Image (cartoon, rainbow, N blue to C red):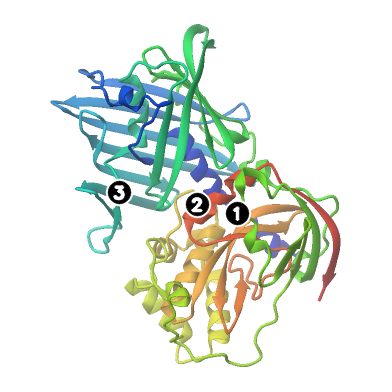
Amino acid sequence: MGKKEAKVCFNLFGVGIVAFWLFMIGWLVKERHFQANGHAGDHNRTPISIDSVQREWREIFLEGDKVGYSTHMIKPFGERYFIQEEIVLRLNLMGSGSGLYTLTQCWVDGEFLLESFNVIMVSGVVRSSISGRVEDSVLVVETGGREDKRIQKIRLKERPIIGASLSQFFKSRKLHVGEVFRFPLFDPSVMAQKEVVVSVTGKERLRIQKITYDAFRLEAEMWGKKLTFWLDEAGSTLKEEGFMGLTTIRSSAARAPEGLERAGGTDIYELVAIEPDRRLPDPTRLIYLRLEVEGLDQAGFAPALLTGGRQRLQDGVLEIRRETLPSHEAYRRPYTDSAPDMSVFLEPEFNIESDDPEIVAKAREISGADRNPVSVAQRLTNWVFRNIEKKPVLAMPSAREALRTRVGDCNEHATLLAALLRASGVPARLSIGLVYTREKFYYHAWTEAYLGEWISMDATLNQMPADASHIKLVEGNLDKQMEIAGLFGELKVKVIDFQHD
C-alpha cells in the first residue's frame, strides 16, 4: 500500500464506537416502562421531590487513561425540572487527538417524563443538533437550522424519559436489591429503539478518591456487553463500568476537567482492531479472500449478510470475492422501478439528505448529462474521495454537513456518497463491517449502489468495486451500525487463502 493510500485509512469508524459510549454516559432517550419481579406498582409510586439545584461531576477513563469528564445539573421549576448534561471527550484516534463535546438540555415533568429536549454535538468544525418535543403519543424530532430544518415524527407507546435524567430518576426512588427495571430505549442520534434491563444485584462497599461508600450495584446488558453501575444510598452515581475499559467515577468541579490538554494513552481504533494470524500483502489488490472467523455468534448477532452477494459463510469459513463491474447498462438513470424494496434506497433519510438543494445541485454538477449509472457512480466516488479531508469526526454523520465542511472519516464519506447517488437517481445503501489495513482488520463503513446488481464502492479509499478485504457485517443507517457493538473484542480471524488481480 502506498503512502497516500495508507494515509486515507487512518480515520475509519470512530463514531460507531463512541456512539456506544454515549449510552453508558447517558445520552439516550428512553420510553418509560418499569417492571419489577411482579411488583410493577412499586415503581409507580410518587417520586421523592427534588427541591433545590443539584450538580454532579464525573471523570471518564479508558483503560485507566483519563479521556474526558461530564457534568450533570437538575433545577426544579414548580412541578417541573430542567436538566442539563455536558460531556467532554478527548480521544486518541490513530495517533491523532480528536475532541467531542455534547450538550443535552431537557424539560421534564415531576415524574421525569420528557416534555422537550435539545442535543448539540461538536467535533472540530462539525456541529450537529437534534431537538424534540412530545406531543401526545408522538415524539417530534427536528434536525438542522431554521433555514434547512428537517422534521421526523416517531410514535411512542408511552411518554419517554431522557437519559440525562435517568440518574435523577434513581435518585428520586428508594432502591431495593432484587428490583428489575426495563427501559425500552429510543436514541435520537441513531433513530433506534432497544430495550435495556437494569437489575439491582446487590449492596457492597465502594471506595472512591479515599472515601468509602455503601453502594447499590446495578447491572445491565447492551448488545451483549455488560454494564455495571454503583449508586450511593441517595441514588447518586458513584461509578460506571462498560466495555473496552470505559469507566466513569464521581468527581468534583475542580478535579473533573484536569489533565485533558492533549489526547494520549489507548488508541480507540486499536482497541477494537482484529489482528489475523498472518498479514495480507497488497490488500487493495485483493480479488478473493478466504478466512476462518470465530465469534460471530456473540451478543445474538445474526450473520445473515455474510452469505449473499460477494460473500459466502459456511461452517465458520468466510469467502469474499470482489465484484466485477457490469459490462452493459442495466438501466438508464434515474432508476424508475417503483418496487417498495428498492424505492427506499432512493429516498432521503434523516442524515442521508439526498433531497437537500446543495446535495442535489452537487450531484447534477458531477453527473452532468451522463445517464449511465456505472460511470456516474465512478464519478461520484472519485469526487468524494478527492474533496473530503480524511480526518476524525466524532459527531453523528450527515451528508449535508459533510458536503459543507468537506471533513470526515469513513462514515461521512459513505453517507455523502449514498446521498449523492440517490440524488442522481441511483439506488444506494450503507455497508458496515471490517477492512484490512496496516496488518489488522478495522471497523469501517462504505457504500453500495445498485447498478443492475449491488456493487460495493469505498469513497474513503477511492475503490469501485471495493477490494476483497471489505467484510460486510450489517447494512443500513446508524441504527444498524450499532448492532455490531456486541462483536467488539470478540472476533478472531485466520487467513486461509487469498488472490490478487
Question: Is residue 252 at all visible to an observer of this figure?
Answer: yes
Q: Secondary structure at mark 1?
A: loop
- Identify the mark at residue 107; answer none if there is no mark: none
- Identify the mark at residue 393; answer none if there is no mark: 2
Compare marks 1 and 3 and give the one earlier in the sequence.
1
Kindly identify the residue that appears in the image at 72 percent across and 46 percent down: 295
Residue 374 at what x, y percent from top left? Answer: 58, 85
Q: Secondary structure at mark 3?
A: loop
Decide: marks 1, 3 in contact (CB < 8 A)? no
Compare marks 3 and 2 and give the one earlier in the sequence.
3
Q: Quadrant of the C terminus?
A: bottom right
From this view, report whether residue 278 is shown above or below residue 430.
above
Decide: marks 1, 2 in contact (CB < 8 A)? yes
The CA distance from mark 3 to mark 2 is: 31 Å
Kindly identify the residue that appears in the image at 53 percent across and 71 percent down: 384
Kindly identify the residue that appears in the image at 61 percent across and 57 percent down: 444
Residue 61 is drawn in which quadrant? Answer: top right
Question: Is residue 95 at all visible to an observer of this figure?
Answer: no
**Between tags 3 and 2, which lies in front?**
3
Three-letter amino acid code at disc 1? Answer: Asn
From this view, report whether residue 189 is shown above or below residue 388.
above
The CA distance from mark 1 to mark 3 is: 36 Å
**Between tags 1 and 3, which lies in front?**
3
Three-letter amino acid code at disc 2? Answer: Val
The CA distance from mark 1 to mark 2 is: 9 Å
Which residue, given by chain and number where applicable, does mark 1 sit on? 11
- Identify the mark at residue 156; answer none if there is no mark: 3
Q: Secondary structure at mark 2?
A: loop
Three-letter amino acid code at disc 3? Answer: Leu
Residue 488 at what x, y percent from top left? Answer: 64, 44
